[in-house]
Image (tube, coloured by chain):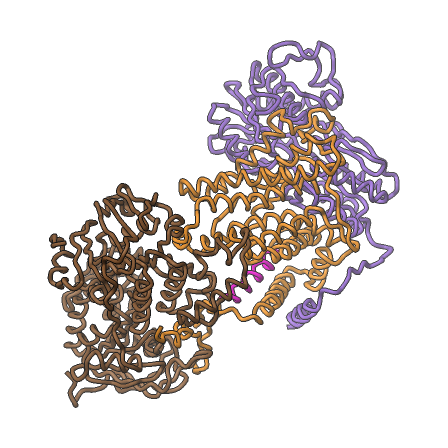
Chain colours: A purple, B brown, C orange
Amino acid sequence: MKGSGRLALTMLAALGLGACGSTSAANTSQPFKAAWVYVGPTTDHGWTQAHDDGRKVVEQQLGSAVQTTYKENVPEGPQVATVVEGLIADGNKIIFGTSFGFQDAMYQEAIKHPDVKFEQATGTKTATNMGEYFGAAEDADYLTGMALGAASKKGKIGFVAPFAIPEVLREINAITLGAQVTHPGATVQVVWTNTWFDLAKEKQAAQSLLSLGVDAIGQGQDSPATGDAAKAVGVKWTGYDSDQSSYAPDIWLTGTVYHWGGYYTDRVKAAMNGSWKSDNYYGSISDGLIDLAPFGTSVPQSVRDQITAKKDAIKSGSFYEFTGPLKDQTGAVHVPAGTKLTVSDLYAMDWFVQGVIGNPKGS
Amino acid sequence: MVTAGRIPAVTMRGITKRFPGVVANDQVDFEALQGEVHALLGENGAGKSTLSNILTGLYRPDEGEVVIQGKPVTFRSPRDAIEAGVGMVHQHFRLAASFTVAENLVLGHRDAADRGLLLEPKVVEGRIADLSRRYRMPVNPRARIWQLSVGEQQRVEILKALYRGARILILDEPTSLLTPQEADDLFQTLRLMSAEQRTVIFISHKLEEVMAISNRVTVLRRGKVVGTVMTKETNQRELARMMVGRDVVFTQKKEGPAKAERTVVLELRGICANGDLGTPALREVNLSVHGGEIVGVAGVAGNGQRELAEVIAGMRRRTSGSMAVSGKPTRGGNPLEAIRRGIAYVPEDRLGTGVAPTLSVAENLVLKSYRRPPISTGGLLHHRRIRTNAEEVMTRFNISARGPQSPTRLLSGGNIQKVVLARELSGRPRVLVAASPTSGLDVAATDAVRALLLQAADQGDGVLLISEDLDEILALADRIAVLYGGRITGIVERQKAAVEELGLMMAGSTGAT
Amino acid sequence: MIRIERRLTESRWLLLVVPIGSLIGAVVLSGIILFFTGHDPVDTWQRLLDRGFFAPGALSASLVQATPLLFTGLAAAAAFRMQTWNIGAEGQLYLGAVGASGIGIALSHQPAGVIIPAMVVAGIITGAAWAAIPGVLRAYTRTNEIITSLMLNYVAGLLMNYLIFDSHSYWRDLSTFEARVFPLGKYLSDAGNWPNLPITGIVIPLGFGLGIAAAAVLYVLYRSTTFGFEARVIGDSRAAAHYAGIRTRRKIVAVMALSGAFAGLGGASEIGDFRHVLDPRGLQQAGFGYAGIVVAALARLNPFAVVVVAVLLGGLSNAGFALQGATFPAGLVGTLQGLILFCALAGELLVHYRIRVRRPAGTAPIAPQPQASSAAGAGPA
């Protein structure tokens, strides 16, 4: 009954609100505050969830020294600035934005608040207090492609792709190159969804590929909807962003995953001890930001061994998938023998390698 | 017939019911005996509905007591009244349109609920068949309500009350939506019920049917009982006086100017038009109306009356033929053209078509004049002029409403019709088309509306009166045209008109012109 | 025994008491939920009001959210008043954004005095034209405008996607580095960015000012013009309108276009005031058009009430993000926001309907009967 008495009191007090201003407690020993702004829900089993898993790692690693929070489902546009302002008013000293569409607002807020650190995933703009970070997903994509090639009997692979942008084009190229290792002559057919996260559209796109007869399917989308469609017809599937195997364990092969936790922990630590500096971070399979999800039960040991060996080669630097000669869709040599594509080549990629069925300009 | 030994089925003593600003029932005493048909007569707003709503548990009286079959009762809901054996058939039916007759009968019925809401179609249908045989109300228990005619739906309402064990049946204006034949059938059913010692309370403002069906009549006026009389010992004139509080002079047409002096204001030549379903509804209609003349169009409903009125008012396109107003041809099919050419129209559907129901009285009074000065200039409305226009018109036409701004739907039927007529006549028309202008109105309102029609003719307008009420046409029209199957089957002068002849023409036989 | 019945008259004091009662209801109900989910109700409500309205800059931020809602709310109100159900403000706003950004890019070398009026006009025209499609279909082929206007929202969204993601259209930026990383539209020149109207510390977007003017226009249109009179007659009874010689078909097209013009102006404001670029993802994620229907309903289709409700909902949206966090899930925020709207709508119901509780003793309040008002009205003419 004590509880309900308190309830009644608090409600009465709440009625008398309105004129009260904000009261920010000035506590000197309070924990360092870090915040994340997400475009999707933290339960998307994809992109946003991977970032939120990283946030949880920060909490585990740094314990009571930090206090983290997040805002999810934030629409791209003018409201981003309001949300970021709110986070700054709440005392957050480092703010991570995880959607490209947040960049303008993040940048403007960075200029306005030089005492707060900003980090923009998949971004292009930096400032003295704003850094940019992403990962070389293509390394793991190449390995994912190997799994798809091995699983495909006919060599017809499908791929559900979000946008025709360099990030996604290099992903598709890496997958295609990988698939052709385990299944020479394999093709990858692409369907564009023009969305990162839309369960219905993604599933529809996957179904259209499956109806064309692809017998292995991959995705660059942020949800496991492609797996949902593949499960219905028993076609093997690779995921993206997070380990999505629990969705359809029977058809799950593997997938490119991000482990943001390590990077986030480093950056928050740096912000706490004052060593934080603006940077363009491009994480990789060797520093653990990018990884391959655990193999599904249907992946034979021989394939696992082959992929693991290639992974080690990439880690050691003895192998790089975007090394010439690479042919484009017409069969012409696009990258001469011996030439290695640089990171800026990757960031400007606008062509498909031989074996991709689809238009690198979208549609 | 009433005998001294009979028990009162319903006794209401000293019933008073007040609503904000009005006493709807003022110390009303009312008694209905077992096995009698008792008419409750009064004008709209006299308190009939309030009294019946108290008897059926919808309202609770502020004062007074209700005794049913000798036992004092307090109804908290219509359900209590049903359990006490009081059933009501409302003017507007309360049936679920997509359900069958049988389903409607058991809907919300407690017996059905006690059996766990399981319908037992055989049992229910059997009982319905039983009841409809007994009271001569043929109806198919499996038909869905929307498939039934109005008369059939009313039978379902009555059956519903009987099915729930009503010993006392209240009917609110039961004939207002029925054809004459259906009304006759209803009366027969009511007589059978009274013969079985059921009590029928018959609410009406129509003198003829009260005379025809009831054993006794209780007359209400302004919430008070004027008196209760034996039907056999009274006549229509006495009842009308009791109801209205003065002698009613049933309006009669005085002789108009000689035909030679008149000009033709409306000329229809070979008009053909289709009905709503796209089938021909008017075939080669020829008709002319002179200034100062009232031409009555008689006929059984559904023979092209509505289509004829709509063609003249521009609301329906004619498929062939020509129409001229004051000698000038019209293009037709355009209500605005008709309005501009001086055709006023009182539509049969007064609340949905004649006025916009939720708009104010003031706004409805300018429904056709809002386009021009003084009501508007340059597309801007002058609210003050709309208001002063309303105040002036409401006084001139004796329209009772709380004020010019009150929503028109809250007015009584008679006052709504006066709003329509006031607006149409103040537009200075040449032709006035009035479709069933008095249907559903009480005696005083009917009288007022007829007076306005006569006044229009006196001012030189040509009036086309379309009505199913032959008495009305005989009372008002100079000439009578009969419409049958979309054709004019004859036009006769009123003086020469014999009712039998008109009846024959209405039934389709061609008469003399 | 509880019954709900329609009130015949709406008493004035109810119009004041009910909103306050609704607020109390929302506070109490949300307090219970917050308490049992382990949050301090006082703290939560204080934060909600603070971040939505009272903190420095909070009202300015709420106006940013309120501006598009104001336009889509007016769009819904304009159509709904005539019982024409334009559900397409969403797509009409997109089209307004397409039109305004297109003209803004084309005139990028012109001064603000040229670009901004051109963007306003372009937004109005494209929004109105898009809305006229379901209007014409409704008027001349009797196609249900709810379905057609709704479907056109998806078409409009796909059109924006096409312009930015799927084609090398005029709107798309093909030159900058950012636009190669992710497809972007061309940004307006600085002169094309709409100015703010700073008044006593609150930043008022130009679009919000235009929205208030638009509300005044809508109010005058419906109250004091023959256009509005005709629309009200049609809304009340199509048969009566036909009878009165009103050209109902043209009117339906005109009112739909008017409704679309408001939404299109909202799209122009989104571009000019806030985004400065055609942003298909952000606009579609925001869903202003659908929220506008809620705004119009809460405002009882009154244009000035739309202004107030838009600001309240804008603040509620911002406050929602302020509440959200690691220990305060988005679902709970949505529940709170829904509860507040629910209480407001329930209050609205109470203004129009009364709840009768039948007690055993004979003292239950009783509704007046319709006939009573005309009791004295049957006198002779």
Judge whether residue C78 is colored magenta. Answer: no
Closer to the camera in the image, A111 or B222:
B222
Q: Indicate the position of residue C289 as horizontal and vertical percent values.
A: 58, 46
Closer to the camera in the image, C14 or A1:
C14
Eyeballing the image, is A107 above or below B175? above
Judge whether residue C349 is colored magenta. Answer: yes
Residue at 80 percent of width and 51 percent of height: A91
Can the viewer see residue B91? Answer: no
Q: Indicate the position of residue A84 as horizontal and vertical percent values.
A: 75, 46
Closer to the camera in the image, C37 or B325:
B325
Q: Indicate the position of residue B497 as horizontal and vertical percent values.
A: 14, 62
What are the residue bounds of the magenta stretch? C337-352
Q: Residue furthest right?
A: A274
C66 left or right of C133? right
Q: Main secondary structure of the magenta part?
A: helix
The quadrant of the picture occupied by the C terminus of chain B is bottom left
Q: Indicate the position of residue A237 as horizontal and vertical percent values.
A: 55, 29
Eyeballing the image, is B417 above or below A139? below
